[in-house]
Amino acid sequence: MTESSPTAPLPGTMPQRLPENAPVASDFNPGALAKGLLRTIRAGTLATLDRNTGHPFASLVNVATDVDGSPLILTSRLSTHTANLEVDGRCSILLAETGKGDPLAHPRLTVLGTMTPIERDSTADARRANGVAGITPERVIREGVKAEEVLKLIDEDEDIAILVLAASSDNEGPGPLVANLSKTAGTFPIPVAIVPSHLSDEELDALS
């Protein structure tokens, strides 16, 4: 029996270059911190492979997350990174928390993977959400001022029974949408729930 080849290291790992005896804070939970950044950071740096030269090409994009935490971006065929992804879907996204002082002192996360296109009429996400919550969601994409479009959609769709918003953990506040809508929440025709950013997926499951 031949000896199997060693397992290839994961992208970004540097076992021979990190201090083995570096102290780790007792309350440091990298998994929970990574989930928190994924759910709350709304813009990040997307690095794709340039379709002409193969060089890393970085661009700023708005980021959301799917029900399973996978990053989602809204692409435009006019963007260079979209053209790059159409040739090679491999990429990474840097999500960083901002604040006062040294920017490198704040939490940040790099997510590596392969982007795949999602059609506007795709039902895959709806089926997955249905399996989790027993409810088939509807994806709505609208253009305009976010708060105004949310209110218009509530007025137009009588099946919307509650508005659930996720608050950001950013030092600048809970986020523009939460801040804007919370001012008029008392006049809403439906209940409004604001979910704190520090809750884990398990805690959210327990609430729902």
Image (cartoon, rainbow, N blue to C red):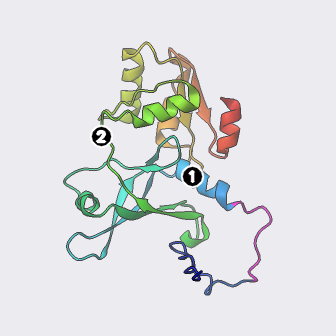
Residue furthest to the bottom in view is: 16
Mark number, residue 195: none
Q: Is residue 25 magenta?
A: yes
Q: CA distance from mark 1 to mark 2?
A: 31 Å
The answer to whether residue 144 is above or below residue 160 is below
Q: Is residue 100 magenta?
A: no
Q: Main secondary structure of the magenta part?
A: loop
How many labels were placed on the picture? Answer: 2
The answer to whether residue 160 is above or below residue 56 is above
Q: Residue at x 36, y 28 (%)?
A: 149
Give the extent of the magenta segment: 21-29
Q: Quadrant of residue 89?
A: bottom left
1 or 2: mark nearer the eye: 2
Q: Residue at x 66, y 46 (%)?
A: 198
Which residue is nearer to you in this view: 34 or 89? 89
Q: Amino acid at mark 1?
A: Asp
Q: Amino acid at mark 2?
A: Glu
Quadrant the N terminus occupies: bottom right
Is there a contact, CB below 8 Å, between mark 1 and mark 2? Answer: no
Question: Does residue 115 appear to the left or right of 7 in the view shown?
Answer: left
The residue carrying mark 1 is 170
The residue carrying mark 2 is 119
Residue furthest to the front in view is: 1
Residue 185 in picture, x, y percent from top left = 54, 23
Query: Counting other residues with Cα less than 10 Å from the Cα at mark 1, is it few (<14), some (14-19), or many (20 or more)?
Result: some
Q: Quadrant of residue 153?
A: top left
Residue 62 in picture, x, y percent from top left = 39, 51
